[in-house]
Amino acid sequence: MADTIYYPSAEVCAQATVQEYDELYRYSIAHREAFWAEQAATLGWYKPWQQVLDDSNKPFYQWFVGGEINIVHNAIDRHLSGATRNKLAIIWESEKGQVRSFSYHALNREVCQFANVLKSMGVRRGDIVTIYMPQIPELTFAMLACAKIGAAHSVVYGGFSVEALAARIEDADSRVLITADGGYRRGKPTDLKSIANEAMQRSPSIEVCITVRNNGLDVLMESERDFWYHDLQALPIASPRCETEVMSSEDMLFILYTSGTTGKPKGLVHTHGGYAVYTATTHRMAFDIKPEDRWWCAADPGWITGHSYMVYGPLINGATLIMYEGAPNYPYPSRWWQMVEKYGVTILYTSPTAIRGLMRFGDRWPSRYDLSSLRLLGSVGESINPEAWRWYYDVIGGGRCPIIDTWWQTETGGFMVCPLPITPLKPGSATRPFFGNEVGVVDDAGNEVPVGEEGKLVIKNPWPGMARTIFRDPQRYAELYWGDYQAQGYYKAGDSAKRDQDGYLWVIGRMDEVLKVSGYRLGTAEIESALVSHPAVTEAAAIGLPHEMKGTGIHTYVLLKTGISGDKHLEAELKEHVARELGRIAAPESVHFVDTLPKTRSGKIMRRVLRARALGQDEGDLSTLEE
Ligand code: WTA
């Protein structure tokens, strides 16, 4: 645990919206429902709620029960009558340097058109629309259009591939898919539509596929199923006026699939009411959002960070957001810094992996640009190593900008542990709980472990942004997250952590089969099942090992079918196979051909043993190992 403490400057403190943490924190815990009701009251409701929190059916908590709201009413409609109407909502830059920008007024027209197109294709309230797109403005329009008409969206990250997309379409049983011909990455066009086509073959529930033209790639369109968005947009039905559907607080806003312990991804369900309140409040308070801010969340909307802090939270707060489609170091390692100067970015929110990736090119790239517009910096996805923290702080932030290190998860919807701009910082610690949350570091019995010792990270209370369930699998939700500490009613995060003498939390990492590779969340089981789908493979195990840039790198152990021998050629083929099935981000660093895998007597692969061996560490307790 680093011992240097970084105190915020007098200037930062003077500007801060929240001037004092302790007292407000105590209030938010003692009067949790009142605290959240006050926050909720800053949003627009069609009908006020009757009950802030309904905890009669634990762990299926409900928030703002009886209230009527639509998150789009808050993210767009409310801004149309005031000064925000003509403010820029989105500034988008493509890798090639194309710029498109949309005021709130223009955003509304785009979203209404998209909503009308969806309606004309038979999308109704309650439907689940799958979205598989590159990071272009239409991705945001599509998400907001679904929410506006009461349909739920299921966004699948554009870097995922056939099997990942097919499995998510199937689980959601989507009838409509929105995609694009493709995007760009490092100057080369990427092809999304052919991946979508293959996924639709594997998951036949899709009846309508709407394709946005982006990179002009020649793609296969199937008559009766496939439509170009620009053709539909030209029809009279695609009017730029559309009523926002009145939803109940607890109506489903979206599903987002994430990796867990099994091969089957879990669809976490988030709702209109609580999620709107939680993302807006956390974004406003932790990042001290001001009307003149230019907010850049350099994540992809395909992950929870993009949902909560690229789209919903910032738009509800009426911010101007920056969106960039492309690699951070293309064509030069100064691309981001050039954009910070060009757009006058005031807050940059990104991942430790991106910071490490840019740090490697040295100070000369950022030093060519004027980064003085920056006021705050943010980090998310994994613990930030002190070296990257200091570079971010000194070189990018010029020693002026507090780093808001936010710990949270797809399941939590928004920040759970994070500093405020006024909080003294320790590099590598996400500091203290956000308002309303009691965070514990406990042993298996649920007792707090002593200061400085490692324990399991738990949340001891419900919060408005919490996922409501796993789609179609409420039992798994109850068991997985709430089963271990049922008596106490604690939510188990799946991370291990320590708390120091100042009450600061230090997240150590995942305790389950989840890997955070470059901040992306992947499951060992998904990687293994992609390997096993190759005809040469009978069995496979995937583990994560430390990686200098990515945080964690994927390493695999493979048992081949009899008669097949492993060589360099097959190793390359298997890596490529995983990339093609699951996505490039999941491609292993190494493939080792082995004769046996360490297993328990009940047949479970002991990845812990593989890890220990790879790291040359003690293999630990081997009593359950077979043989
Ligand atoms: C990890 C991403 C340390 C953690 C928002 C968590 C972090 C998982 C941090 C969730 C952080 C996220 N410090 N670890 N600031 N932020 N994590 O669902 O292991 O993609 O459980 O959500 O990322 O990943 P997910």
Image (tube, rainbow, N blue to C red):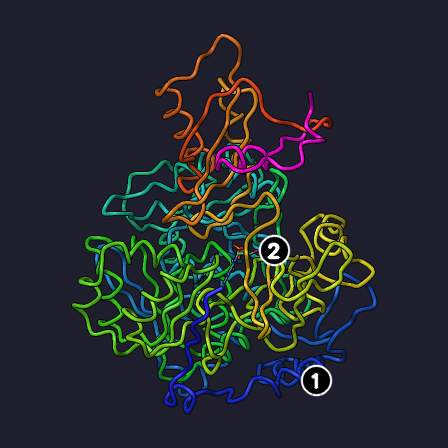
Magenta segment, prevailing SS (helix, strand or loop): loop
* Residue 254 forms part of the magenta stretch: no
Based on the picture, tell me whether residue 620 belongs to the magenta stretch. yes
Q: Which mark is residue 34?
A: 1
Disc 1 crowd, CA 10 A, few/some/many (<14, 14-19, 20+): some
> Mark 1 against mark 2, which lies toward the viewer?
2
- Which residues are the magenta region? 604-627
Q: Amino acid at mark 2?
A: Ser
For the point 59% across and 40% down, the residue is 170
Going 72% across and 26% down the picture, which residue do you hit? 601
Q: Which residue is mark 2?
A: 496
Q: Quarter holding the C terminus?
A: top right
Q: Is residue 353 visible?
A: yes
Residue 188 appears left or right of 63: left
Which residue of the protein is positioned furthest toward the bottom in this rendering? 14
Question: Tag 1, which secondary structure?
Answer: helix
> Contact, CB < 8 Å: mark 1 with mark 2?
no
Count of marks placed on residues: 2
The answer, for residue 89, to whether it is visible in the render is no
Q: Residue at x 63, y 60 (%)?
A: 453
